[in-house]
Amino acid sequence: MQIPESELVLNVDGSVYHLHLRPEHIANDIIVVGDPERVPIISQFFDAIECKIQKREFITHTGTYKGKRISVISSGIGTDNVEILMTEIDALVNIDLKTRKLKEKHTSLNIVRIGTSGSLQAEIPLGSHLVSTYGIGLDTLMCFYELPQNQIESKVGEGLKVQLGLPFQPYCVQNSIDLAEKLGKDMLKGVTATCCGFYAPQGRKIRNELKIPQLVHVLSNFNLPESPDFQITNFEMETAGYYAMGRLLGHQMLSLNAILANRITHQFHPNPEKSVNELIEKVLEMI
C-alpha cells in the first residue's frame, strides 16, 4: 500500500513535515525531552555532534557519546506533540519515503524520555528520580486510536473515569520492561498520570473554578483491587502518550522523571536544574 501525500506530508527536501528530518539524521537510541532548551544541555556532553536541525519546537541533535550514536529530540509540551514526534520518527525508519510504502523489516527504536514531574505522594522526596512503570493518559489522544490494553490497564481507565466523572475513558499503558531494567533499576518506581494541561487539568486553581476539585485527592488515593501495589505517584504531560504510541508503533519506550514538586506537601525543589542534570548524566551513561 502506498501512503498518499496528504497523509504523510514531506518537505521539498524529502524530510518529514514537522521534524524536518531525513532517515540519516536519527540514531536508533533516542532521548526525548519536552523543553527545546534542554536539547543542547544534553548534547553538550557528546564527543561529537553530526547534525543540528530545528523546526518549530522540534529540535534534533544527533552525535556520539563515548562512541555510541544518540539523538536528542524535543517535543514541546503535551501528548498532541508527542503523537507528531512518534509518528514521524517511526516513518523515518519504517517507511520508504521515496516509494511511500512500508518497509518489509520493522525497526524498533529505543526511546527514553527525560522529564520533570510533580509528586502525588508525600513520602517521595524532591530531587528523586522516578521511572514510570505505567503511564495513565488523562487526555483524549487514544480516543482516536485502537489501543490494545491488558485487563489491569483497562480497569485503571474504567475506575478513573468513574471516580473523576470524565466524559471519556483514560488509557493506561505499561513501559518497556527491557529498558526499565537497563536504565531504571536504581530509581524509584511509580505510576505516572499524564494530564492535558498544567493548571486545572493538574488541579491548580488560579482564577477560574475547578470542574474536578477532587482531582489530586482521587489520583493520590486511587487503588486497584486487582493489583494492591498499584499507586499513582506523580503526574506530568507526556508519558502516557509516549507509552501508547510506542506500543502502537512497536518501539521500546521508557519515561524517567526528575521530581521537582510535591503537590501533597506543596513544596518545590530549590535547585531543579541540579536534579535534571543528574538524571541526564545517568541516562547518557546507561543508554
Image (cartoon, helix red, strand yellow):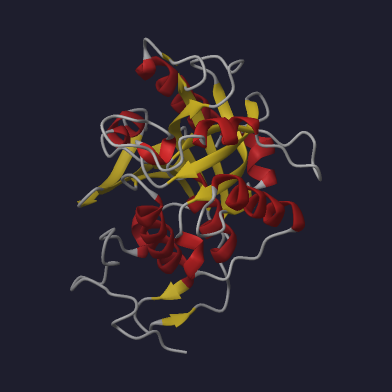
Res 38 → quadrant? top left
Image height check: is 159 above or below 38? below
What residue is rendered at 37% in x and 38% in y? Answer: 200
Q: Nearer the viewer, residue 236 or 167?
A: 167
Q: Is 258 rendered above or below residue 155?
A: above
Left or right of 94, for residue 230: right
Where residue 267 sits in the image (x, y, percent)? 43, 13
| Residue occupying the far bottom of the picture | 1
The foreground one among 118 and 219 is 219
Residue sitting farthest toward the top: 270
Residue 57, percent from left and from top: 24, 48
Determine whether 136 is above or below 11 in the image: above
Residue at 36% over, 76% down: 97
Q: Give the quadrant of the C terminus.
A: top right
- Indicate the position of residue 84 as horizontal and vertical percent values: 36, 60
The residue under the point 68% across, 57% down is 154
Where 97 sits versus 72, above or below?
below
Quadrant assignment, res 251? bottom right
Residue 231: percent from left, percent from top: 68, 33
Q: Is residue 238 left or right of residue 232?
A: left
Q: Nearer the viewer, residue 65 or 17?
A: 17
Q: How many marks?
A: 0
